[in-house]
Image (tube, helix red, strand yellow):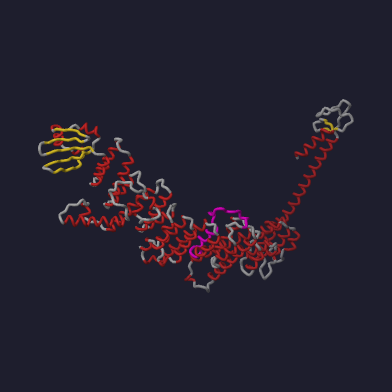
Amino acid sequence: MDLEVHREWGVRSIYCHLAKTGSIKSFLVPLGSLNDAFINLWKYGGATYLEGRLEIALGSYHVICFRKISAEEQIKDLLRKKSFKEAITLVEELEHEGEMTREMLSVVHAQVGFLLLFDLHFEEAVNHFLQSETMQPSEVFPFIMRDPNRWSMLVPRNRYWGLHPPPVLLEDVVDDGLMTIQRAIFLRKAGVETAANEEFLFNPPSRGDLLESAIQNIIRYLRVNRDKDLTSSVREGVDTLLMYLYRALNRVDDMELLASSENSCVVEELEALLDDSGHLRTLAFLYASKGMSSKALSIWRILARNYSAGLWKDPAVENSHQDNTSTDIISGQKTAAIEASKLLEESCDQDMVLQHFGWIADVDQELAVQVLTSDKRVNQLSPAANIHFYVLTLEEVIAAIDSKKVEILQRYLQWLIEVQDFDDIRFHTLYAVSLAKSALETFENGNAYCNPTARRSEEMDVSGLESDAIFRSLVRKKLQSFLQSSNLYDPEEVLDLVEGSDLWLEKAILYRKLGQETVVLQILALKLEDSAAAEQYCTEIGRPDAYMQLLDMYLEPQNGKEPMFKAAVRLLHNHGESLDPRQVLETLSPDMPLQLASDTLLRMLRARVHHHRQGQIVHSLASAINIDAKSARLEERSRHVQINDESLCDSCRARLGTKLFAMYPDDAIACYKVGELHLSAFLYQK
């Protein structure tokens, strides 16, 4: 057999017609399977070639005829016989030798994929789909959603050779395949051979396993195609149907990931499906990704308030132990509040913010504060603008905040004042009053808690006392810091609130704002007994009489209090030079021990004398400098210069004659005009 002749003809396989005893059979024989018997028949038999047909005569009983056929027919025949690997191999060889296009290879891969899909080999089918460069994702849409639907017109028609049935839902594919397997098993028992898969015949799969495998592999195909450059319509179909398949397998994590990320899902196709199946969380994420914040927030609100009723289909929670039910509820509510707060932090809809602010505050106050003070909102206006969103109407915010949630209001006002630089007296006063109320409550609660009659000593929790004391300290420090730093609140309104309390330092700050120096000194020196603060306040006042007033308070504290001799001595020691010794001696009490004051008075008198002598020295130095200046001026004025008719101005060279002129320290002379210009320039530089 001359194989070279066959290569020239481009033959890869041939039809063999065998005529014997009057019967003729036709079958396809690949070129590589021709054995030596055929080769010998070719070499020694007679042969003719007529109109594309090669005939061989083999005696009186056999006639063998070989006919060349097209590559496409050869591929189709292999596919009909389910010889998929041979068909792919043949196409790859033809494509490699340039006798078939790469597009045809993609078509064959797709055709093989569909045939395998209807044979229930879903993983292999999708593998061939992915190897096809021409197959469109829309071609699998009919297997997921029943026609007609939104994407029915996107499915290509008549692209293949009609070797597989028309596309139907995956459920129908599985049902038809199982029916075929059952029929094959019945025929096998009756002794009739079938072309069914041997593995399926001996170990029939279950419908659930097949359907799950089908869905998982279609999901795999769609996820790969999501990364390709698709038209908007096809991309919508891919994402929407991918959500369908996720829901069918209850893959909640994948559903939420798809819904919360950038996607092309069609909400109208999914909202009823997700709502009916109870996947409200996924639906909320989907609404949010499409900018439908109001609907998303409504769902989060439902989930937060009714989580224990089972509206949240979370497999992790459903499979948890019953002992953790309360923990799961709290965690679910917190998660719902977190997701809702993310939407509200970016929302510029004031009404929507206040509508959902309340229930978020019930779950977590920190999240509520973040909603009110968010810096993530777009189109932010200047804080001075009346329509600035950041400054939600104060009355509306107060109405939305529960009166028991004081911290939210305080942190909101603090944000307005410190971050947004608001200088409205209402904001500052309201913040100061609110802080003062909190300080009073914590102070009174702390006193009641520490009262020995309130609870027995054995019941006292030391760690609880320490943490409570720290909290009270922080509250008061915040109040004191604001009272000192702000000058825009109404001190009288705050003072009316704390007047009858023991918040002495706060009252000192307020009285100082009102300019009542005597009251401030009384609080610092007598109530708080803070000598350093009292002396510092006198220094800030800057008048010597303030020190004398403080000394009087130390020596005559009134209200039956003993004189504060040590504080008085400290004052004299630190600021004695600022006091008049005569007034000090007149003020000192006869009851004051001499040994306490003697050293201090002596130092004060010495300092007074030293200060007086320093003044004399400074006065004498100033007088000497003045005398030196007068002497130098006199010397300058006593200098003479001789001018005649030939004398010239050293600058403009004009004759001086009888004109006015000026003489410089270097004995240079200049006419009056030049001298005036130089003087003006000198004064301008000064």
Q: Is residue 384 magenta?
A: yes
Q: Residue 58, percent across and down? A: 12, 36
Q: Is residue 139 left or right of residue 26?
A: right
Q: What residue occupies the far left of the structure in this picture?
A: 60
As for residue 69 lying within the magenta part, the answer is no
Q: Nearer the viewer, residue 349 or 136?
A: 136
Return the residue nearer the eye: 223 or 83: 83
Residue 360 seen anywhere in this rendered image of the structure: yes
Residue range of the region highlighted in magenta in the rendering: 361-386
- Rendered-image quadrant of the N terminus: top left
Q: Position of residue 420 (x, y in %)?
A: 60, 55
Residue 466 seen from this side? no
Q: How many marks?
A: 0
Image: 300 above or below 227: below
- Residue 230 is left or right of residue 457, and the answer is left
Name the image quarter holding the C terminus: top right
User: Percent from the top left, x then y, of residue 185?
Assistant: 19, 56
Left or right: residue 660 versus residue 369 is right
- For this orientation, the residue located farthest to the bottom is 453
Residue sticking out furthest to the top: 646
Question: Which residue is at the front of the view, 118 or 374?
Answer: 118
Rendered residue at 76%/49% (across/down): 615
Q: Where is residue 64 drawn, in percent x and y?
A: 15, 38
* Closer-to-camera residue (604/468): 468
Q: Is residue 586 left or right of residue 82?
A: right
Displayed quadrant of residue 320 = bottom left
